[in-house]
Image (spheres, rainbow, N blue to C red):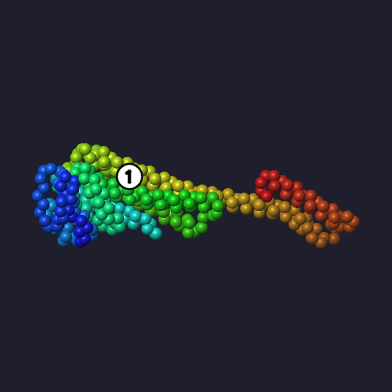
């Protein structure tokens, strides 16, 4: 286990570093609490935290496995919150998990697979003691807000790629690689939506429900997190629709271009059918065919072919087939 940081806070200020095996007796004042941040712990190491802070066994098991969707569970006077982190990689969206144990005087964050450390967040909170003095519920808000804010650059990056793909569709046919990328992005956005929906529910419960360790005064902060989640949800749904429209629009353009080419070929085939038919008739070499002995038969036939072909060309040109 990597203990990233473990400190005792009092009245919004860091007092001293603590160990995970140390028993901390905090007064009833919520402004004094312990904040422990760990990364990729083992089952044995989580068991030590469980004994020290009376963590529920089911919550500890979930924190070790790290395969949960976002959720919030109540265990007596403690809360267990799971959030999913996300970051954009070359092949798609990579997910991590942050499990958070909240008690009256402690908050323990357990990270799995997340590339974004909470170091910058901790420094930001320590620089604002008037906010950190609110206690563990404000720290919970800050962690959730930090996780959700990480969604926005990801979705904006995908949005830029989708808009560029949409513009490219106007200029040329989509190749196999572009079509494959469209379906891959659509699949990733659907998976991302499955993370956003329970995250929305978690933030909504923190706003609406009376939960242990959550002061009603902090509900506006969780409401802000809920607004951020809904914003990302709206963008995600919009991108899925845009990807579907890009594919459909590309198909329509391809059908339109194919139809135009088909009409051109049909027009030229009709024009070329005239001399072909006439030449075919007079190429049968029957002895008693009319006009075979006519002095001006050949130029007359050529003139007839030219007139008919010209008339057909003008007609097809007017209707837009050529």
Quadrant position of residue 119: bottom left
What is the x, y in percent for residue 105? Answer: 14, 47
Q: Is residue 254 left or right of residue 17?
A: right
Residue at image x 75%, y 57%? Answer: 276
Residue 297, position as x, y percentages in the image:
86, 55
Q: Quadrant of residue 23?
A: bottom left
The reply, left or right, for residue 66 in relation to residue 155 is left
Question: Which residue is painted at 21% across and 53% down in the image?
Answer: 109
The residue carrying mark 1 is: 229
Q: Position of residue 72 (x, y in %)?
A: 23, 46
> Mark 1 packing: few (<14 Cα in 10 Å), some, or many (20+)?
many
Which residue is painted at 79% across and 49% down in the image? Answer: 307
Above or below residue 300? Residue 202 is above
The quadrant of the image that shows the N terminus is: bottom left
Q: Nearer the viewer, residue 226 or 220?
A: 220
Outermost right residue: 295
Numbered disc 1: secondary structure: helix
Q: Is residue 75 left or right of residue 114?
A: left
Asked if one can make out residue 285 in the rendered structure from this viewpoint, the answer is yes
Pick whichever, 33 or 44, lies toward us: 33
> Exactly how many numbered labels are in the figure?
1
Identified at 11% across, 52% down, the residue is 24
Instruction: Give how far across and how far down residue 86 sits, in percent.
Output: 32, 53
- Residue 68 visible in the picture: no
- In the drawing, does residue 274 fall left or right of residue 23? right
């Amino acid at each position: 286990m990597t203990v990233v940081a473990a400190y005792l806070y009092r009245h919004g200020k860091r007092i001293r570093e603590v160990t995970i095996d140390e028993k901390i007796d905090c007064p009833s004042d919520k402004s004094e609490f312990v904040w422990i941040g760990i990364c990729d712990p083992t089952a044995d190491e989580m068991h030590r935290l469980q004994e020290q802070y009376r963590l529920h066994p089911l919550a500890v098991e979930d924190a070790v496995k790290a395969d949960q969707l976002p959720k919030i569970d109540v265990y007596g006077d403690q809360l267990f919150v799971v959030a999913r982190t996300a970051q954009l990689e070359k092949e798609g969206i990579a997910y991590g998990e942050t499990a958070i144990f909240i008690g009256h005087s402690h908050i323990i964050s357990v990270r799995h697979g997340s590339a974004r450390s909470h170091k910058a967040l901790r420094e930001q909170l320590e620089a604002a003691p008037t906010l950190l003095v609110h206690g563990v519920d404000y720290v919970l808000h800050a962690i959730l807000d930090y996780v959700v804010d990480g969604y926005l650059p990801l979705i904006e990056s995908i949005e830029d790629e989708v808009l560029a793909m949409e513009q490219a569709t106007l200029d040329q046919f989509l190749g196999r690689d572009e079509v494959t990328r469209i379906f891959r992005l659509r699949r990733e956005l659907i998976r991302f939506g499955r993370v956003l929906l329970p995250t929305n529910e978690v933030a909504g419960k923190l706003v609406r429900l009376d939960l242990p360790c959550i002061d009603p005064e902090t509900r506006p902060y969780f409401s802000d997190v809920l607004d951020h989640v809904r914003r990302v949800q709206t963008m995600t749904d919009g991108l899925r629709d845009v990807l579907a429209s890009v594919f459909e629009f590309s198909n329509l353009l391809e059908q339109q271009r194919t139809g135009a080419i088909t009409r051109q070929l049909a027009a030229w085939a009709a024009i070329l059918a005239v001399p072909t038919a006439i030449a075919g008739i007079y190429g049968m070499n029957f002895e008693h065919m009319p006009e075979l002995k006519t002095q001006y038969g050949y130029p007359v036939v050529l003139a007839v072919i030219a007139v008919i072909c010209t008339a057909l060309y003008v007609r097809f040109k007017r209707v837009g087939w050529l």
